[in-house]
Image (cartoon, grey):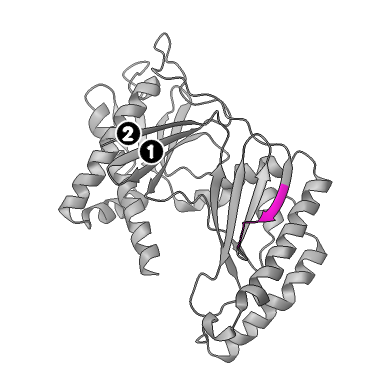
Amino acid sequence: MKKSANQTINGKAFEYALLKSFDESLKTITSVSILENNIYSTALQCFQGLPEKEQVKFEKAADSAAKFLLEIEPRLSNSLNENDNLQLEIVSDKAGQHGDVRDLLAIRSLQKWEIGISAKNNHRAVKHSRLSNEIDFGEKWLGMPCCKEYFDEISHIFNQLSKIRDSSGATQKWSSLGDYHTMVYLPVLEAFTKELIRLEKINPEMVAKRLIEYLVGNKDFYKVIKRVKRVEIQAYNLYGTLSSAFETIKPKNKVTKVKLPNRLIEVVYQENSKTTLLVTLNEGWQISFRIHNASSRVEPSLKFDINLVSTPQTLFTTTLFL
């Protein structure tokens, strides 16, 4: 839990560092305002809570990323007139539940334009979604409800976990269950796999596309990943809105549009693993789903750690060394 908490704090701190870098870079050349709400205050507190040396590292990474993005997004620094204000804001995490994974927004209302950034501190995970009796992943992720047979297959497993939790007063640990990977994980993963393939068969061309929209994002964005002595920037230009010109001013680099998939090719277990599925889609997309218990104590739900294994070759990616 401590690692997860630290990751959240560092992530929020990096969001603030990026916001600050954009503000400092732009305020002398265009009208800029910051939406200072509760979300902003939380990010500021996370940043201020870091040791001074860490703050400097975060600022250096953010400055490098902001400088690069200014070069490929000319609308950031160019306004139509004195009333064309650029608003910077940090977005609530709740937006990600609906497929909008952006953490930071830069908005020009007068131009009807915005770009978003997903800020990550040293990790690549795209989602941490749960499975349980109460969660219809088909409806929540894809807008396509799971069938009764899926819930029938998983219900006895999660009901048993619920009984264990309740009878132990929520104190019994997973480690006391023995080989819970085989007893719990495998049947849940089998049911999940079967249902994902069933949904694909009755909704051809839709499941793969909506899966990426849910996991990667339903709006275009830049992913900025802070690592040790470097920053990685990826452009998820799924809908063609990134790196647009401002009047006659063109971006220094043109970001290629990335194709969404329209076919689920296969769902298999990762080699030598009972906990990780590899979902392969067309157009170069592959996703790993690693199932795990989110707590050391038994509870009637499981969590997916979801990562992109491969992306289309057209995905714009660059590394900035610090």
Residue at 83%, 47% in the rendered image: 202
Q: How many neighbours does mark 1 have within 10 angstroms: few (below 14), some (14-19), or many (20 or more)?
A: some
Indicate the amino acid at tag 2.
Leu
Q: Which residue position is annotated with label 1?
A: 232
Residue at 62%, 36% in the rendered image: 284
Give residue 94's position: percent from left, percent from top.
Answer: 50, 53
Where is the C terminus found, in terms of image quarters? top left
Q: Of the two numbered discs 2 and 1 on the same chain, state the one appearing first in sequence.
A: 1
Indicate the amino acid at tag 1.
Glu
Based on the displayed image, in which of its 4 quarters is residue 290 positioned? bottom right
Q: Is residue 76 above or below residue 4?
A: above
Q: Is residue 310 above or below residue 72?
A: below
Does any portion of residue 99 appear in the rendered image?
A: no
Helix, strand or loop for disc 2: strand
Based on the displayed image, in which of its 4 quarters is residue 9 positioned? bottom left
Q: How many neighbours does mark 2 have within 10 angstroms: few (below 14), some (14-19), or many (20 or more)?
A: some
Give residue 131's position: percent from left, percent from top.
Answer: 63, 65
Based on the displayed image, in which of its 4 quarters is residue 216 positioned? top right
Which residue ends up furthest to the left in the rendered image?
Answer: 52
| Residue 15 part of the magenta segment | no
Helix, strand or loop for disc 1: strand
| Residue 271 part of the magenta segment | yes
Mark 2 and mark 1 residues within 8 Å of each other at the beta carbon: yes
Give residue 264's position: percent from left, percent from top.
Answer: 72, 44
Residue at 67%, 58% in the rendered image: 137
Q: Which residue position is annotated with label 2?
A: 320
In the picture, measured across the screen, residue 245 lies left or right of residue 32, that is right
Give residue 82's position: percent from left, percent from top.
Answer: 31, 19
**Residue extent of the magenta highlight:** 266-272
Where is the N terminus found, in terms of image quarters? bottom left
